[in-house]
Image (cartoon, grey):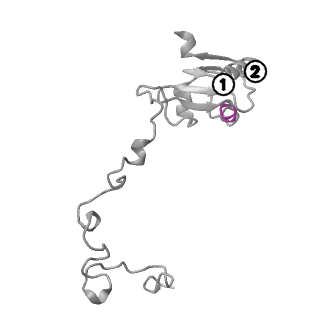
Amino acid sequence: MKLNELRDNPGATKSRKRIGRGPGSGTGKTGGRGIKGQKSRSGVAIKGYEGGQMPLYQRLPKRGFNKPNRKKFAVVNLGLVQKFIDEKKLDTKADITEDALVASGLVRRKLDGVRILAKGDFSAKVKLVVTGASKGAIEAVEKAGGSLTTAAAAE
């Protein structure tokens, strides 16, 4: 097979409907838009319009609140930290900081800080210094003989 012999499967491509090209085409004159009315005109976008009735999205009650200055943490599970330690991507002799986690590739970016969660098995004796951690994660690290310091505790 050569490049000039390449063909798409039969029926894979369909030519587009050419609207408003004379009466013989079947979509001439009004171009499939019917006669008169708002939708037959150009430049009309009426997505949520219900003919003058209050639209559904306005009738439904509004609830909740999104905090504009909320903190977004990079979440890391202890099992992954252990895996990276086993693969020698993280050095157990030095403190494991947020920068070390980013450098190892475990965290892509710090965002507002790194938060450690307790999912997975953890057995390394290390000193972790991060922005936040769950109670279970702190217990798991201390049970393994290490320590987990959070920025919240330091303040």
10 Å crowding of disc 2: few (<14), some (14-19), many (20+)? some
Please identify the residue farthest to the bottom as the structure is shown: 24
Q: Which residue is mark 2?
A: 144
Secondary structure state at the residue bearing disc 2: loop
Picture coordinates of residue 135, whole percent (x, y): 67, 19
Q: Specify the principal SS of the magenta part.
A: helix
| Amino acid type at mark 2 | Ala
64 in magenta: no
Q: Which residue is mark 1?
A: 92
Instruction: Check if mark 1's residue and mark 2's residue have beta carbons within 8 Å.
Output: no
The total number of labels drawn is: 2
| Badge 1 or badge 2: first in the primary sequence | 1
Boundaries of the magenta span: 79-83
| Amino acid type at mark 1 | Thr
10 Å crowding of disc 1: few (<14), some (14-19), many (20+)? some
Who is closer to the viewer here, 51 or 29?
51
Residue at 27% in and 73% down: 35
Secondary structure state at the residue bearing disc 1: loop
Q: Considering only vertical position in the picture, is 153 above or below 137?
A: above
Picture coordinates of residue 55, whole percent (x, y): 38, 48
What is the CA distance from the residue labelled 1 to the residue labelled 2? 13 Å
Which of the labelled discs sits on residue 82, or is there none?
Answer: none
Query: Where on the picture, by quarter, is residue 125?
Result: top right
Picture coordinates of residue 143, whole percent (x, y): 76, 18
Q: Considering only vertical position in the picture, is 80 above or below 145?
A: below
Residue at 45% in and 30% down: 66
Q: Is residue 7 left or right of residue 94?
A: left
Please identify the residue farthest to the front as the structure is shown: 53
Mark in the foreground, 1 or 2: 2
